[in-house]
Amino acid sequence: MPFQILLNLMIAFLWMMLNGNWTVSGFIVGYVLGIAVLYVVRKFRPEPFYLARVWAVLKLAGLLIRELLISSFEVIGHILRPKLKMRPGIFEYRTQLSSDWEVTILSCMICLTPGTLTLEVSDDNQTLYIHALDISNVEEMSGKIRSTFEKAIMEVTRS
């Protein structure tokens, strides 16, 4: 991936040099041209196209923002209710992520989401102990984490 980014930048600067256009618009045109060239020759390179990973990172960031907004409104709803109908609790979550980096990102994303907090990660990095503000169904909450955060983290780290 770093090689593709460097090659794309070199194509952009080469384009600017050949055209004698040293402006931002000339760089953007050259960069887009470089993306097109790299996309065409991607079949001859062993590593995957680098914009696929960039797109996965953007999707992960969008997912985090969406989950932050949804959970923030859920917490506000709990606060504004005259009678609290929360069922706080701690549950054990078994993750499919393997590397330390992946588990750290998952636990940080869980901590950043209002209403949930990662209390501890087991020694083997396979189990997270999570406190949630409202646990109606542990399997549903685990499935939601697995289908959103964990899936998006795997898309970023395992290309």
Image: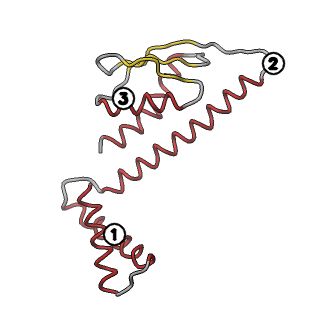
- Disc 3 residue type? Val
1 or 2: tag closer to the N-terminus: 1
x and y percent of residue 154 in the render? 35, 37
Callout count: 3
Q: Which residue is mark 3?
A: 103
Could you tell me which quadrant the N terminus lies in?
bottom left
Q: Is residue 77 left or right of residue 14?
A: right
Q: Residue at x 38, y 71 (%)?
A: 32
Residue 63's tag is none
Q: Secondary structure at mark 3?
A: helix
Hey, which quadrant is residue 36 in on the image? bottom left
Q: Secondary structure at mark 1?
A: helix
Q: Which residue is mark 2?
A: 82
Q: Estimate how packed mark 3 is, as few (under 14), some (14 to 19) or many (20 or more) residues with alpha carbons within 10 Å.
A: many
Q: Estimate how packed mark 2 is, as few (under 14), some (14 to 19) or many (20 or more) residues with alpha carbons within 10 Å.
A: few
Classify 15 as above or below 75.
Answer: below
- Disc 2 residue type? Pro
Q: Is residue 129 left or right of residue 69?
A: left
Q: Which numbered mark, 1 or 3, is in the foreground of this view?
A: 3
Classify 57 as above or below 41.
Answer: above
Hey, which quadrant is residue 18 in on the image? bottom left
Residue 36's tag is 1
In the image, 71 versus 10, the foreground residue is 10
Q: Secondary structure at mark 2?
A: loop
Mark 1–mark 2 distance (CA, rounded to whole Å): 58 Å
Q: Residue at x 23, y 59 (%)?
A: 3
1 or 3: tag closer to the N-terminus: 1
Q: Which numbered mark, 1 or 2, is in the foreground of this view?
A: 2
Mark 2–mark 3 distance (CA, rounded to whole Å): 37 Å
- Disc 1 residue type? Ala
